[in-house]
């Protein structure tokens, strides 16, 4: 898979987040990756929360990200919580590590 473009966009229609699988309305700012794999182009949208979660745990994903990766990560320690609650827990752990 080859990355063609990575950017922040304001969506023109509802988009599903690749990380948490929630659907966001048109007009939402999201991160988009455009890729090409075996001649097929694809776009993957990520909400701001999942993008921040990824920034905290990117080193776990050497082989790329599957759809629903945020939900998979949350299932180990934060099942039943929202991605925002999971992000807050990651930020709290990061703050504690810095002290």
Image: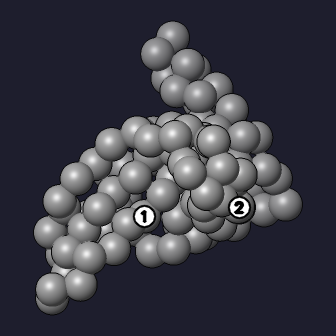
Nearest to the observer: residue 24 or residue 26:
26
83, above or below 42, in the image: above
Q: Using the rendered image of the protein, determine whether residue 74 is visible from the camera's viewpoint.
A: no
Residue 14 point in image, percent of width and height? 65, 59
Residue tagged 2: 22
- Give coordinates of residue 73: x percent, y percent: 58, 62
Report the colour scheme.
one colour
Q: Counting other residues with Cα less than 10 Å from the Cα at mark 1, is it few (<14), some (14-19), or many (20 or more)?
A: some
Name the residue located 33 percent from the left edge and 42 percent from the top edge.
Answer: 7
Residue indicated by mark 1: 44
Query: Helix or strand or loop: what does disc 2 sit on?
Result: loop
Q: Residue at x 69, y 32 (%)?
A: 88
Q: Residue at x 42, y 64 (%)?
A: 44
Query: Which residue is rendered at x = 15% and y = 86% of the image?
Result: 39
Packing grade of label 2 (10 A; few <14, some 14-19, many >=20) is few
Q: Earlier in the sequence, mark 2 or mark 1?
A: 2
Which residue is farthest right?
Answer: 80
Decide: is 97 above or below 78: above
């Amino acid at each position: 898979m080859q990355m063609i473009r990575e950017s922040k966009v304001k969506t023109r229609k509802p988009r599903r987040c690749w990380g948490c699988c929630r659907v966001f309305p048109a007009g939402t700012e999201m991160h988009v990756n455009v890729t090409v794999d075996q001649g097929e182009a694809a776009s993957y949208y990520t909400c701001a929360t999942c993008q921040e979660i990824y920034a905290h745990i990117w080193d776990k994903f050497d082989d790329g990200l599957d759809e629903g990766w945020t939900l998979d990560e949350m299932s180990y320690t934060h099942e039943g919580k929202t991605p925002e609650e999971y992000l807050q827990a990651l930020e709290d752990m990061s703050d504690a590590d810095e002290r």
